[in-house]
């Protein structure tokens, strides 16, 4: 215990380091979703479209995805404490700059930089907490940390809703500043760096791998976000960036498999369970962040709720997931196979999505969402840790850390792709449903004429002239068609999101279990 190279801490030092690391992890996680309920405010304030404002979320996720696989060697190059403190400073400074952004693309740029700082906070916080506790006491620390990782994305919308309703959207970024300043000072004072092996020289660092990763992910995201608006491959930019993304990913894979010090060790994917777990992590990210994106957007833009009402709707789901966590932990410790828990979680998530598909209308009430979101909370609780432990169940030694980093990156990528794909799909389906609805409206149809005349009389009773009232009647009819088209688009998203999870169930059940090996939950939470 008195080994000077040991990073285990005791007493108040350990408490301070634990609180600092958990706060930094929560800052990063909550910031992934806190902007969701502020999107409408940002659109109006900065004069942006739905597709443009989705970049506020996506840019942050891209920054996360790029930095997570690099965290290990950045810590080695600069020392963990220094790198962790620098990441908090970058995150905090960019929070201030996001709040002061004067246009949408300025905000998107600062969110990307904030994501570069934030990605390191999550991974490094996990490592710090693991190392300051003696092995026999790590379970409690990991439980607290795991709880934050699970419920963080769901706590973002209610917190964001309260801030947007009572202050203004820049304050969702400003609240990070005091926490960031305190966390930086505590990190410099209390966190210690392990003694690393010899630093890699700049000639050994996989600069080409970093460049290819950044280029391919960035190009792919641009294609997903702008494709619908720019008419897909009729746009030379979209075509060029699609080719760039495809070749970028190809050469990135080739580089990582052939270079002696790869930035992402793809060889670890030879493990079958990790391959399945990586795909499942991507799908989990798609469902977790995608569903947290569409619900506030639907309730505000279609139902006309305030940001706070929209955010508060998510609280029961967060509490349900929190309640599920110790139960899932006990089930795993008792030896229940991870794939059974994951398959159950996916079926429950399908039930949630199909429920959403059935209840959406132009005026769905608050009560209709309650039990649906409780089901979502149960489903996510059954998915998160079991998927990660399933991924790592047949890995050994150093491979466990590499596998954990890989699943974390793919979960974030899934969320990023999910938001991009969903916002594009909603825009596209909206036009499809609108055209279909309009084609069924014949102005010579007696039923349509009666509806328009009824609205005309209604407007005339409010003092309008017959011509103006008739014009307003047609406008009202057009508004009803547009609103119904939007509702149908959201219904499609819920249905297909659920089907995606349901299709995965048989594949999960075919994954072979490794009953002999117990997985360290502290690694799984990474």
Image (tube, helix red, strand yellow):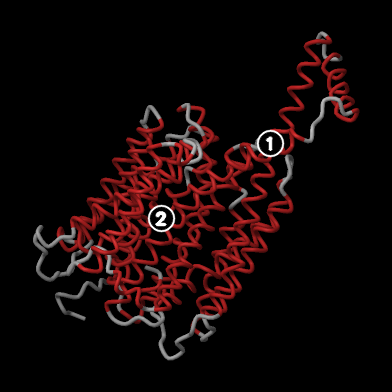
Q: Quadrant of the C terminus?
A: bottom left
At 19% from the left edge and 75% from the top edge, which residue is drawn? 6
User: Could you say which quadrant of the image residue 440 lies in?
Assistant: top right
Residue 120 lies, in percent from the top left, at 30, 56
Seen from this angle, which residue lies furthest bottom?
Answer: 516
Task: Say which residue label 1 marks.
Answer: 434
Q: Is residue 401 above or below residue 485?
A: below
Q: Secondary structure at mark 1?
A: helix
Residue 387 image point, x, y percent: 48, 72
Drawn side of residue 238 relative to residue 133, left or right = right
x 33%, y 38%: residue: 109
Q: Residue furthest top?
A: 465
Closer to the N terminus: mark 1 or mark 2?
2
Residue identifier under label 2? 26
Relative to the observer, which residue lies in front, 375 or 142? 375
* Rendered location of residue 370, percent (x, y): 69, 54
Q: Are marks 1 and 2 in contact (CB under 8 Å)?
A: no
What is the x, y in percent for residue 90? 27, 45
Q: How many numbered markers are drawn?
A: 2
């Amino acid at each position: 215990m008195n080994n000077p190279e040991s990073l285990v801490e005791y007493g108040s030092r350990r408490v301070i380091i634990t609180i600092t690391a958990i706060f930094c992890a929560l800052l990063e996680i909550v910031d992934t979703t806190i902007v969701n309920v502020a999107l409408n405010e940002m659109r109006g304030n900065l004069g942006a479209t739905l597709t443009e404002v989705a970049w506020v979320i996506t840019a942050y996720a891209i920054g996360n995805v790029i930095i997570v696989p690099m965290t290990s060697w950045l810590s080695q190059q600069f020392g963990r404490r220094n790198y962790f403190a620098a990441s908090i400073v970058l995150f905090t400074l960019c929070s201030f700059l996001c709040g002061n952004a004067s246009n949408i693309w300025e905000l998107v740029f600062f969110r990307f930089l904030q994501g570069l700082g934030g990605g390191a906070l999550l991974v490094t916080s996990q490592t710090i907490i693991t190392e300051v506790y003696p092995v026999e006491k790590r379970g409690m620390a990991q439980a607290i940390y795991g709880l934050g990782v699970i419920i963080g994305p769901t706590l973002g919308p209610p917190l964001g809703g309260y801030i947007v309703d009572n202050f203004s959207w820049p304050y969702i970024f400003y609240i990070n500043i005091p926490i960031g300043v305190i966390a930086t000072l505590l990190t410099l004072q209390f966190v210690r760096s392990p003694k690393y092996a010899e630093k890699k020289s700049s000639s050994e660092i996989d600069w080409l791998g970093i460049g290819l990763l950044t280029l391919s992910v960035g190009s792919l995201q641009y294609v997903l976000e702008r494709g619908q608006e720019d008419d897909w491959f009729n746009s030379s930019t979209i075509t060029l960036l699609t080719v760039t993304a495809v070749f970028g990913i190809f050469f990135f894979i080739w580089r990582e498999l052939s270079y002696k010090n790869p930035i992402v060790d793809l060889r670890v994917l030879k493990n079958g369970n990790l391959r399945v777990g990586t795909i499942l992590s991507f799908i989990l990210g798609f469902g977790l962040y995608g569903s947290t994106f569409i619900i506030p957007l639907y309730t505000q833009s279609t139902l006309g709720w305030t940001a706070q009402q929209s955010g508060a709707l998510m609280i029961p789901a967060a509490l349900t997931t929190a309640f599920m966590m110790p139960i899932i932990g006990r089930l795993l410790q008792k030896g229940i196979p991870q794939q059974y828990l994951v398959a159950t979680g996916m079926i429950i998530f399908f039930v949630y999505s199909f429920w959403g598909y059935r209840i959406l209308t132009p005026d769905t009430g608050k009560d209709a969402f309650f039990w649906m979101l409780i089901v979502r909370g149960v489903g996510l609780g059954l998915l998160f840790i079991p998927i990660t432990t399933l991924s790592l169940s047949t890995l050994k030694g150093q491979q466990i850390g590499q596998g954990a980093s890989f699943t974390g990156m793919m979960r974030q990528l899934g969320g990023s792709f999910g938001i991009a794909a969903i916002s594009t799909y909603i825009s596209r389906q909206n036009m499809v449903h609108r055209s279909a609805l309009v084609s069924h409206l014949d102005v010579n149809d007696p039923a349509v004429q009666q509806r328009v005349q009824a609205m005309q009389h209604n407007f005339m009773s409010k003092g309008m002239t017959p011509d103006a009232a008739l014009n307003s009647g047609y406008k009202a009819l057009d508004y009803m068609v547009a609103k119904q088209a939007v509702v149908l688009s959201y219904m499609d998203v819920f249905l297909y999101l659920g089907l995606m999870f349901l299709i995965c169930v048989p594949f999960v059940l075919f994954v072979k279990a490794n009953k002999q090996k117990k997985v360290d939950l502290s690694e799984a939470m990474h």
